[in-house]
């Protein structure tokens, strides 16, 4: 591995571990610091990344455990239904894009001539990402209904995949100069995504702390 | 259906590993390598075992200068007894042991 790449991976892993410390509930902070402290003993870049992603997963699952509101079945059902609605929207857009490829004449009538230029420019990868995101939402909803807090990583993956696909769709829309089309909604989605990411980064730096020189009591 | 506490394959693997060196303090990464558990799986189990009084932890100085303190773990006497029960396949439950300890 080249030195710059190694250094870059070290920075990413440290940053993820820092974020895990910030996310972990106060009563569990010591555990997050313990996970972070182990990073200093890991040399291999990819191993550090794997470790820090695990830290993040543990921190978020502990954070969600503190959401007492999720103990209510009604709330879980509501969130699951919203998730399924999101999954339906994603799978529908992926299906439309796919149908355009297989039956462009039908799609032209159904979607309208204006949207066709957008669908024509959508790469297969984005269709796949939308479908994957829909599947992840569905799995996360199923986990949530079964009162399994393991839904968190699936939600994180679903939102991440959707954000990437939305950015991709947005890029495609911009590239074909179609901001006035119905796909405008995806632009709002992208900007919402950017805002969430910015808030997460701001939150991360707000709680940033440096490794303790002495162990916490 | 409620899951029995500490009966998952991952927890049993960790208990067996800790039972292998009952008096030694073990680092998280070392445990992860020995059990094959990822950090995201390992640490929630460690937290739960510590909450249940089966595991104790402390911060340990490193021999290498500049390396931060590391968190190390080992089973408590209750944890050792529980891990032995599990290793021998006895149907001892955690709640029974904890109620005995509390009485």
Image (cartoon, coloured by chain):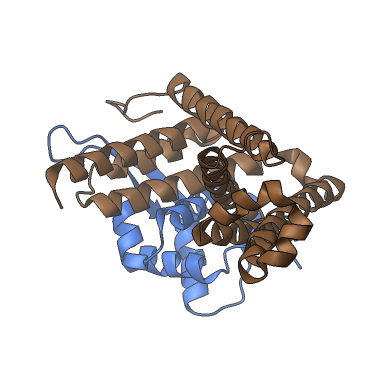
Chain colours: A brown, B blue
Could you tell me which residue is drawn at 70 percent across and 66 percent down? A105
Residue B59 shows in the view: no
Q: Measured along the vertical axis of the image, is residue A16 above or below residue A90? A: above
Could you tell me which residue is drawn at 50 percent across and 65 percent down? B11
Place of residue A35 in the rendered image (x, y in percent of width and height, measured from the top left): 38, 43
Q: Measured along the vertical axis of the image, is residue A57 above or below residue A212? A: below
Place of residue A7 in the rendered image (x, y in percent of width and height, measured from the top left): 20, 39
Tell which residue pokes out farthest to the top in this image.
A206
Q: Measured along the vertical axis of the image, is residue A9 above or below residue A197? A: below
The residue nearer to you, when weighing A94 against B20, is A94
Tell which residue pokes out farthest to the right in this image.
A74
The residue nearer to you, when weighing A200 against A160, is A160
The residue nearer to you, when weighing A25 against A146, is A146
Place of residue A210 in the rendered image (x, y in percent of width and height, measured from the top left): 33, 25
Could you tell me which residue is drawn at 48 percent across and 67 percent down? B10
Number of marks in the image? 0
Residue A176 shows in the view: yes
Place of residue B75 in the rendered image (x, y in percent of width and height, measured from the top left): 42, 56
Quarter location, residue B93? bottom right
- A91 to the left or right of B101: right
**Rendered-image quadrant of the N terminus of chain B:** bottom right
Could you tell me which residue is drawn at 12 percent across and 39 percent down? B64
Quarter location, residue A141? bottom right
């Amino acid at each position: 591995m080249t030195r710059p790449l190694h250094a870059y991976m070290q920075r990413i892993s440290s940053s993820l571990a820092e974020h895990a410390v910030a996310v972990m509930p106060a009563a569990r902070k010591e555990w997050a610091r313990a996970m972070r402290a182990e990073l200093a003993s890991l040399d291999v870049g990819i191993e550090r990344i794997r470790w820090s992603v695990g830290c993040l997963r543990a921190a978020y699952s502990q954070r969600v455990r503190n959401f007492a509101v999720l103990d209510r079945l009604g709330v879980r059902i509501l969130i699951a239904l919203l998730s399924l609605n999101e999954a339906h929207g994603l799978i529908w857009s992926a299906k439309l894009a796919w149908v355009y490829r297989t039956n462009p004449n039908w799609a032209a009538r159904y979607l309208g001539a204006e949207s066709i230029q957008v669908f024509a420019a959508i790469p297969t990868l984005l269709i796949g990402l939308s479908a994957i995101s829909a599947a992840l939402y569905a799995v996360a909803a199923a986990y949530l209904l079964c009162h399994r807090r393991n839904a968190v990583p699936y939600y994180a993956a679903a939102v991440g995949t959707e954000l990437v696909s939305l950015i991709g769709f947005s890029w495609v829309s911009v590239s074909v100069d179609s901001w006035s089309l119905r796909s405008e909604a995806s632009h709002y989605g992208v900007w919402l995504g950017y805002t969430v990411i910015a808030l997460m980064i701001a939150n991360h730096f707000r709680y940033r702390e440096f490794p303790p020189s002495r162990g916490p009591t | 259906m409620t899951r029995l506490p500490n009966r998952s394959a991952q927890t049993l693997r960790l208990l067996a590993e800790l039972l292998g060196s009952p008096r030694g303090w073990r680092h998280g990464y070392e445990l992860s390598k020995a059990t094959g558990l990822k950090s995201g799986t390992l640490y929630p189990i460690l937290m739960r075992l510590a909450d249940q009084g089966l595991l104790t932890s402390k911060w340990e100085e490193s021999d290498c200068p500049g390396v931060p303190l590391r968190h190390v773990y080992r089973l408590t006497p209750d944890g050792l007894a529980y891990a032995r029960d599990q290793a021998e396949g006895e149907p001892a439950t955690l709640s029974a042991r904890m109620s005995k300890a509390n009485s």
